[in-house]
Image: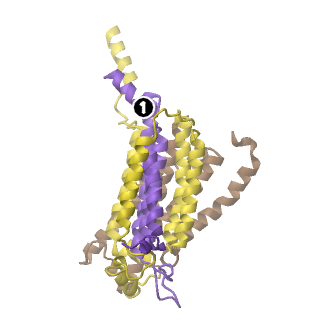
Chain colours: A yellow, B brown, C purple
Amino acid sequence: MTNLFGVVMLSGIYSLVTALVFVNLDAVDVAFTEAAVGAGLSTVLMLGTLVLTGKEEIKTTRKPWLPLIVCVATGVVLIYGTLDMPKYGDPNAPVHQHVAPRYIDDSEGEVGVPNIVTSVLASYRGFDTLGETTVVFTALIGVLILLTGLRKRDKNELTLEELEEQRKREKEL
Amino acid sequence: MMDRKPILRVTAKIFMPFILLFGLYVQIHGDFGPGGGFQAGVIFASSFILYALIYSLHDAKLVLSSVALEIMAAIGVLLFAGTGVVSFFYGENFLNYNALAHDPIHGQHYGILIIELGVGLTVFSAMTLIFYTFAGRGR
Amino acid sequence: MEALDFISPGLYNYWIVIFLMMAGFYIVIARGNLVKKLVGLNIFQTSVFLLYISMGKVQDATAPILGEGFDTFSNPLPHVLILTAIVVGIATTALGLSLVVRIREAYGTIEDKDLLELEDETS
């Protein structure tokens, strides 16, 4: 598909379907976020980029065989690796043995919030969330620097044109 | 451009308060049901993006200017980190909310509400401001 | 590993994740358009989200919100990690998109082949 508009729209639909899968996997909070972010915001941002960069992709003349072989080979190796993994939905899997039971059993007495995800996010792992918030803030600063530049200067500082005019005036004098 | 699309304009105007109300609900009700600062921030941002798309970027900036958003993003992070620092003064660990009220459970509740507010503020202003810069670049 | 084990349905979630991951990986390495590469990265990212969430699922459990009448819950820890990862993901995607916009303004193209040619001409 060389029409990037279609690509962006399809990726939005894909995000929405992923959100439904997350609901099915009991992750309601994650599904909520994915639906709002993936299907809403990222589609809008990508469309905003397409307005600035052009909608059509130039058809590639590249041969697809080498990347295809690399992907298939990696996939086969990864599938071989999954053969030792715990089965889907297995309550005795190693993931469920260590930290999670404590959160599920004790969070009501320690934090007192019914939504365990919120209590882990904000209280048990608050430091982690602080880091994530800072990452969002830093990304914002990065976007602002890249797209609006460092235009806001000191008010007393002269712009380039003003400097040039001043120099001209000095020459005339 | 959108002057000749009355259906879109009227619908957007009707929907705006409901989206904002839903955002507030998600923000404050995050302790009891699915939701929290991250989701509420994104929902709030999407309502402003809707407004800017249907009307114009200029109109959206009249409601909430980019300078105010920059300050709000910083305030969100400061609110989060500041809550952690406050617990220092009660002799607790960083981001331990037990000391914020007379008993630990209430303290945890207040702490979670405050930091979710900080997260919501930062995510909302970051997302809206990113959209503002992308949309403002074209003209 | 016995043949019967190999076709057992318990590992399908991992295989779906690997399929999505490789699809995203293929887009990133085979396509030249930078916006398309970012879409591929997004698909790759979603596959990792799916891996974490599907690992946290427990049979016959419910969403991790405490309430009357429920006693088995899915693992809340992956949900927390992925919840924050999604929002950070969109923030970093926005950063990548703004880089694409700047590249387009500086070079007039966002195809990586053309970019490499322009680089060769200038150097």
Taking the image as drawn, is residue B43 in sight? no
Q: Nearer the viewer, residue C104 or A83?
A: A83
Q: Nearer the viewer, residue A44 or B46?
A: A44
Q: Position of residue A82 (x, y in %)?
A: 38, 67
Residue found farthest to the front = C3
Q: Nearer the viewer, residue B62 or A115?
A: A115
Q: Nearer the viewer, residue A119 or B21?
A: A119
Residue drawn at x 43%, y 53% is C22
State whether residue B109 is above or below residue C12.
Answer: below
Mark 1 sits on what residue? C113
Q: Amino acid at mark 1?
A: Lys
State whether residue C41 is above or below residue B42.
Answer: above
Q: Position of residue A1 (x, y in %)?
A: 57, 41
Taking the image as drawn, is residue C70 in sight? yes
How many neighbours does mark 1 have within 10 angstroms: few (below 14), some (14-19), or many (20 or more)?
some
Q: Position of residue C1 (x, y in %)?
A: 36, 72
Residue drawn at x 36%, y 83% is A101
| SS under mark 1 | helix
Residue found farthest to the bottom = C69
Q: How many marks?
A: 1
**Could you tell me which chain the residue with mark 1 belongs to?**
C
Residue drawn at x 45%, y 64% is C15
Residue found farthest to the left = B91
Check the picture and name the quadrant holding the C terminus of chain C.
Answer: top left
Q: Is residue B64 left or right of C22 when viewed as pictured? A: right
Location of residue B24 by image quarter: bottom right
Q: Position of residue B48 (x, y in %)?
A: 57, 54
Q: Is residue C82 left or right of B23 when viewed as pictured? A: left
